[in-house]
Image: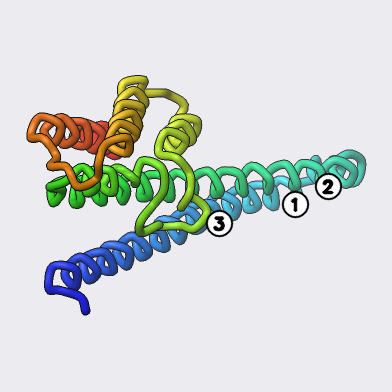
Amino acid sequence: MLDEEQKALIEATERYRHEVSQKIRSELSSAEEEIKEIEQGVWDKIQVFLNSNVGMWLLSSVLITGGAGLYQRMQHSYEEKLHNRTQLIVLQFEIANRIENMRYFWRKASTVGDGAFALKSVFLSKTPINPDVEKINLSVLYFNLYQLIGRQNPEALEIVRELEDMEYDLQAQKSSEPLSEEVKKQGLMLINKLEKFLVERAS
């Protein structure tokens, strides 16, 4: 049977996932509306031009052959923009979710086994925002995020590598041994730094 702390954690996780789900839906709706407005504006301008004499001549001689290709390119561009924006939101929320999970379990950790469990979020998600990223390593999530935003933060990637090394070190120790205060402070410092980088990126 679940104790009160486990129930509270499950409730908090479900609330968090619900909020994230609403935020993603809201962002996607906003992106779709923005794209529709842009597309409508373009077509309004094209329609005004095509109703002119020059437009009619151009339509009959040139646009009939090239218009379809142009429209396909525009549509592809909009779809790519929407996809990238969606991916960016998913990556940001998944990284934030992993950091929050690590911090929660790391603060509660009293043994080496508890610490290793807390740092498992570096490798896979305990409560995934999106099943597509559930088993993707945190360093890969950061790399994908930096690909989308066009710049990297080598320090954040280095911290992820330090957390990976810490998890490997803990796995090599006896799980029932107490987690030293020094290791606990170091882990919490690294987790807090990762969150700082993510907050700076979002602001």
Say which residue label 2 marks.
Answer: 56
Percent position of residue 144, x then y: 49, 35
Question: Would residue 157 appear left or right of 148 to someone viewing this image?
Answer: left
Label 1 Cα neighbours within 10 Å, binned few <14 / some 14-19 / many ≥20: few
Label 2 Cα neighbours within 10 Å, binned few <14 / some 14-19 / many ≥20: few
Label 3 Cα neighbours within 10 Å, binned few <14 / some 14-19 / many ≥20: few
Residue type at tag 3: Lys
Disc 1 or 2, which lies upstream in sequence?
1
Q: CA distance from mark 2 to mark 3?
A: 26 Å
Instruction: Tell me the SS state at disc 1.
Output: loop
Q: CA distance from mark 1 to mark 2?
A: 6 Å
Q: Which residue reaches farthest top?
A: 154
Say which residue label 3 marks.
Answer: 36
Q: Which residue reaches farthest bottom?
A: 1
Q: Nearer the viewer, residue 199 or 195?
A: 195
Residue type at tag 2: Met
Q: CA distance from mark 3 to mark 1?
A: 22 Å
Q: Say whether marks 1 and 2 touch (CB < 8 Å).
A: yes
Q: Which residue reaches farthest left?
A: 181
Residue type at tag 1: Asn
Q: Nearer the viewer, residue 26 or 152?
A: 152
Say which residue label 1 marks.
Answer: 51
Disc 2 or 3, which lies upstream in sequence?
3
Percent position of residue 189, x then y: 15, 31
Q: How many marks?
A: 3
Instruction: Tell me the SS state at disc 3.
Output: helix
Residue 30 in the image: above or below residue 111 = below
**Disc nearest the viewer among 3 and 1:** 3
